[in-house]
Amino acid sequence: MAIVPQNIGTGIDKGNAPLVTRSYLLAFALVASLFFMWAIANNFNDILIKQFQKALDLTRMQSGLVQTAFYFGYFTIALPAGWVMTKVGYKNGILIGLGLYALGALLFFPAANVQAFWFFLIALYVIAAGLAFLETAANPFVTVMGPKATAAQRLNLAQSFNGFGGFLAPFLGGALIFSGVEHSAQEISLMTPAALNAYRASEAQAVQITYLGLAAVVLALAALIHFTRFPEISEDGETALENTDRVRSIWSFSHLRWAVIAQFFYVGAQVGIWSYFINFAQDVVGVSEKSAAHYLGFSLIGFMIGRFAGTALMRFIDPARMLLIYALISAALCIVAILTNGWSAMIALGLTSFFMSIMFPTIFALGVEDLGAKTKLGSSLIIMAIIGGALFPPLVGFISDRAGTIQAGVTVPLVCFIIVAFFGFSMNRRHLAKAV
């Protein structure tokens, strides 16, 4: 969920300006790979939720704490990461982030050995802390690795690696982590204690090699970045606020308040759907865990395609109106997923990924609209709203456990999309009023 600064390079004739300055080609490639790497970590969580249900005998509500630990890491470390980078620089900030990422991945090894869920949650928190550093630094670097006129193109190119990692993660995670061995509750009840312990230990240890490999890749990337020349990022332009901006509270901007609320509910909807998509596919269609992971991957391909399609459509449709339409369609798809059965329900839920694709950056862009000197503070508040990803997945799991059906849990993202639609509606009215 990388934040893409809006309208960089707008109004500047691009001419024959290069996309990336030649001396920074390697640096750009390495930074673009960061977008890929944090998408892998984010979307591996959807595999872990199902895996921990098997390995640690967790309820769906309990397994949702995977996302709680992860997004709480983002929430608590995002602002400190920005402060640290003002002291040590963005490149060193990236190295700190990669170090934390690798440390969290390495902690999976002892966590699997002791089969302690709390240990896994600590490891996930450490990984997310590292990603907070990476996301804070990546976009500024991308903007200065070439001419201003092509900055937006560079950001879109880097963002495409995030989408690629997002859809690849379920296929990789499903192949590397899922054993394909699934026992029914009746079969488990007939196992001897020794056999059951051996089964759960084997499933817990299935994550070890995958996360050790992930740590190795991250450390290799850190070494490459350490020895690569990066541009200096100037903080000029961060002048004192105008007197009027000093007096006016950031919360006096009603559209920013609603953007924070909308982002909170959007991230909750996205993480809630993806976290339990494998459970949903298995329950409503009856496929294996590996097949369910592949279907999640296909859904995330739609997310990637949706970003490209949405960017093109916004040339002709106001972003606020498009957000309203996409949120209403997503809500309708949730209703179909709740009320129907079989493939129609699973396809409906899978299609929400396409329509969610534009929501995060669009809510962000609309929220910081017309903030002037307070744009940076407004941006931080919207970023912190991703805490919704920590709070909503356990709620989806709780409702599913209580109702006895995973489809009941989809009511949570349904409500979230309705709130996002309201924000799109209010911003569309604001744009229409300004156009008069």
Image: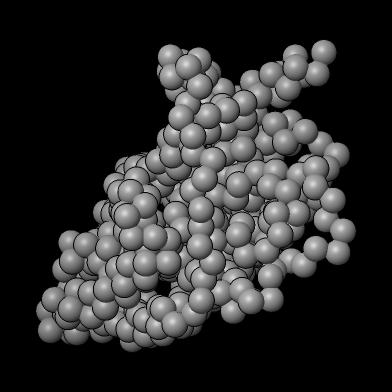
Q: Quadrant of residue 113?
A: bottom left
Q: Residue at x 46, y 30 (%)?
A: 240
Q: Residue at x 37, y 81 (%)?
A: 219
User: 246 or 211, which is in the foreground?
Assistant: 246
User: How was the colour assigned to the protein in this rendering?
Assistant: one colour
The reply to whether residue 339 is in sight is no
The x and y percentages for residue 5 are: 60, 47
Residue 338 vertical position relative to residue 370 in the rendered view, above or below: below
Query: How many tags in the picture?
Result: 0
The x and y percentages for residue 204 are: 26, 77
Q: Residue at x 61, y 68 (%)?
A: 161
The x and y percentages for residue 231 are: 54, 66
User: 47 or 27, which is in the foreground?
Assistant: 27
The quarter of the image holding the C terminus is top right
Residue 96 vertical position relative to residue 2 in the rendered view, above or below: below
Is 58 placed left or right of 254 in the picture? left
Q: Residue at x 73, y 22 (%)?
A: 431
Residue 380 vertical position relative to residue 305 in the rendered view, above or below: above
The reply to whether residue 140 is in sight is yes
Is 168 placed left or right of 324 in the picture? left
The x and y percentages for residue 307 are: 69, 54
Q: Quadrant of residue 385?
A: top left
Residue 329 vertical position relative to residue 76 in the rendered view, above or below: above
Is 187 placed left or right of 338 in the picture? left
User: 312 or 249, which is in the foreground?
Assistant: 249
